[in-house]
Amino acid sequence: MAVHQLIPSFVAGDATGQAALHLQLLLRRMGHAAELYAGEVGSGLESLAHPVSALRPTPDDWVFYHHGIASSLSGLLMHLPCRRGLVFHNISPARFYTGTPLAEALTSGRAQLAAMAPFVELALGVSDFNSAELRAAGYRNVHTVPLFIEPERFALSAADPTQLRRLEGPIPTVVSVSRVAPHKRFEDLLALHAELVRLRPEARLLLVGGYEPGSRYFKSLRRTAQSLPGVHFLGRLSHSELVAAYRSAQVFVSMSEHEGFGVPLIEAMAAELPVLAFGAAAVPETLGGTGIAFDQKHFSFLAELVVEVTGNVDLRRRLLQGQARRLAHFSAENSQRALAKALGEATAPRPPARRPSRKPKRPRVGIVVQRYGQVTGGAERHAQQLAEHLAPHFELTVLTTCAKNHLSWENVFPPGLDREDGLPVLRFPVTRTRNIRPFNALSNTVFNRPNDRLREEHWVAEQGPLCPGLLTHLETERDSYDGFIFFTYLYAPTVWGLPMVADRAVLVPTAHDEPPIRFGVYADVFERPRALMCNTPEEITLIQRFYPKHARTRVVGVGVDRPKASPQRFREKYSVHSPYLLYVGRLEPGKGIPELLDHHRALRERYTDAPVLVLAGEAHMDLKGEGVRYVGRIDEQDKHDALAGALAVVVPSRFESLSLLTLEAFAQSTPVLVNGHSEVLVGQVERSGAGRAYQDLESFITGLREVGSERAALGKKGLAYAKKYSWPKVVASYQEELARITEEKRR
Amino acid sequence: MKLLGRDIPARELIARIEERLRLRGLPTSEAAEVPEEGVEPRVDPLSFNLQALEEHTDPAQPLPLHTHRGGVGQLVVVAKWAFRKTCQVLINETLARQRVFNGHVRDSYAQLSAEVIRLRREVEELKAAAKTPAAPPAEPPVVPVRPRRPRAR
């Protein structure tokens, strides 16, 4: 069954949205298809959350509604024809807001909470305190599923350097994080600060959180703050700025008089900041005996306490050690255990489907790949070749999308069962096409900087392809497969689908050093499968660098076919009569084609006898240039003919996990000239001794000259290297890994 | 004042801080407002909704003036106030039918919610009755034996 979530508002910076994303992650790890539906979807986040009108649950599905302040979705939940659940984030008591429009919405939220009770099968409180309120409101089946935190996102390395510099300052600095609202008692923080500056005149108070500049409450705080030195209202911050604020302070203080959980308390713990908090509502439960909870707001006393915690090294160390232990309680694993218990499932895999207990003759294996068939792409071709070679040994089904173009993901192939070269291919439609320009703009805002989970998930969703049908298939049919082979770490079907079947999945990551590999959302992809089938030792080193807790790795690579080729045939067919450099593959900026064209133009300007540049493949850019021949997409035989006749094959991409083109060139005894910024390509050239690497125009020219003059000798070395890549070896590796999975499953 | 925390020598810490406060001539304890403890009580949805409908039936009644913006927001508040002051007659006229409609909604809700409460009570009574053990069947009435009429020969 699918477990969907319904939230009133899904916008950036909202704690409920973050909680829903976390829950979605856990549900996928538990094997459920899990989509988000929201009453209000923040601008640009449509790829992550669907509008409520799209919610069509089946009677077996669960829908969990996140309840807080009054929302019309509570009425919707009561009428949904499915199993209904509720996640309670608590509601601020209306007594703090008497006389404001908010008071009624808060009381109304509590009335809705009670009204939903008879219609909800399972209620989840994010703390025992919230669970107690659920019981008081009339709920029977109540479980506590705590929120969790990803501590690495609060490390110093995740802090915005500019904000860190801006917030540099004298000690002691106190930070408090929450939206500016009456029950958070910011006036008490100011009172504490007033006492603190008597002891330490240089003390600072950093107040992080959204505020309403026009509200009476904020204006009164502002007036008070103006009479005090060192008070900074920082407003709402981005994630990396928030981390910088935590990391710029010595103590975290909360004066809040109502917290249903208190996320900033555990964020502060993750940012290695001692926590002092007024012990209201769920605060003592969240602290769990760590940090310091106080029961009275005796400000001169608390100011002395802040000084003590700041300056007493031993006390500080003990506090931080205790908090670090407490933090482990708020791990994804703990939350998942609680959630599994609540849903009445074990976290262990579900009982296997009715299949014979004897070892099956041909295990059934699903190959999950973003595109398949008549498409251009290294990973896709890799998947296709592997499928063809594994077919005699396994009962294969390729699970893929209807997309042909990886830039737009437009549905081209018909959905449903198809056959490619005799193999069953099950295609699922993509629900959202991609517009590459806004996507590139988004990439610029998230690459090479720390992000919160929402921003990274958003990027993955925009990257696509969004294919909920494929995820549903994985959920409902997982037990009919003995194993899965996922292709490429990068795309949404892998990021969201692999965790659903991780216990029986291997991944062919095709990883290379590109900005998104640093995203924390990819941790499950590298850490949860049974094995990572890598292409080169460099790829393993790369994965090790970013994911030290990665799954077992092995270098498998691909086999290389060596069909007979005729250079003359290519020359005649395409009228290429002079020496040529060759590139075959996707022709787009991401593959380094503009740089190659620049180098070639410069080469032609310097040398009149410079070789022609022949480009073959699907073009996604303008390819004009003197001496540039674009021959379009060519078939396999033409490709091998072209490779055999080339002076050298150029591989201009910086991002490669294994260049099939390089190996195919070697197989035709043709040397290569590769981009020296790619560790993988450099490694291949060094190990084979069959080419040169370039890093700029000069090394491009030098490399070309050397490759041209030693073509025969280099080509011989290349052929010897290519012979090591044989399909029987590759197939044996997959057989071994998949046998391990089926064996464990049978046991 | 109580300090809670497993990792701190609470008593020693309190004593040390109180000593410092004494040296500074400050009181070591202050009267503090202790917030209400415990979970929030259940809000009965039927009576709350009825009360809320009653309160908001008349759409011509203004809500409290409010803005979350600074600067221009204050001007907006003044403009809203001026509009209400000068145009109340127009507002009343425009929303007259809405007021009547809202009254019907309120009355319907009042009737339906009262009906729900009555039905719930009846269900509870029936459930309770079903739970109580059934009384043993009554003894059959003793029928006096009629003397047989002698057969005619």
Image (cartoon, rainbow, N blue to C red):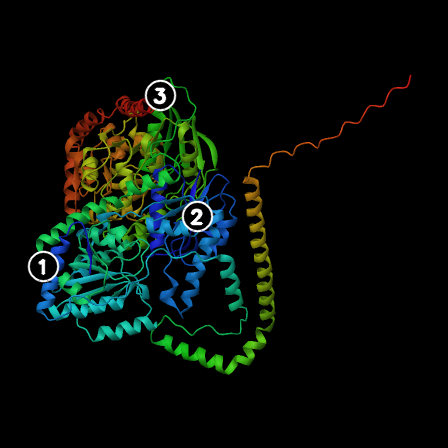
Mark 2 vs mark 1, foreground winner is 2
Labels 2 and 3 positioned on one and the same chain: yes
Mark with earlier residue (2, 3): 2
Residue at mark 1: A311
**Cα distance, mark 1 to mark 3?**
68 Å
Front in this rendered view, residue A518 or A199: A199
Left or right: A688 with respect to A499? left
The image shows residue A108 at horizontal and vertical percentages of 45, 60
Mark 1 vs mark 3, foreground winner is 1
**Cα distance, mark 2 to mark 1?**
47 Å
- Identified by mark 2, the residue type is Tyr
* Above or below, B120 relative to A381: below
Q: Specify the quadrant of the image occupied by residue A709.
A: top left
Q: What chain does badge 2 belong to?
A: A
* Above or below, A188 relative to A331: below
Q: Are marks 1 and 3 in contact (CB under 8 Å)?
A: no
Residue A264 seen by the camera:
yes
Mark 2 vs mark 3, foreground winner is 2
Q: What chain does badge 1 belong to?
A: A
The N terminus of chain A, quarter of image: top left
Front in this rendered view, residue A44 or B86: B86
Which label was assigned to residue A393?
A: 3
* Above or below, A588 relative to A499: below
- Identified by mark 3, the residue type is His
The image shows residue B94 at horizontal and vertical percentages of 57, 75
Q: Residues within 10 Å of mark 1 (few under 14, many from 20)?
A: some
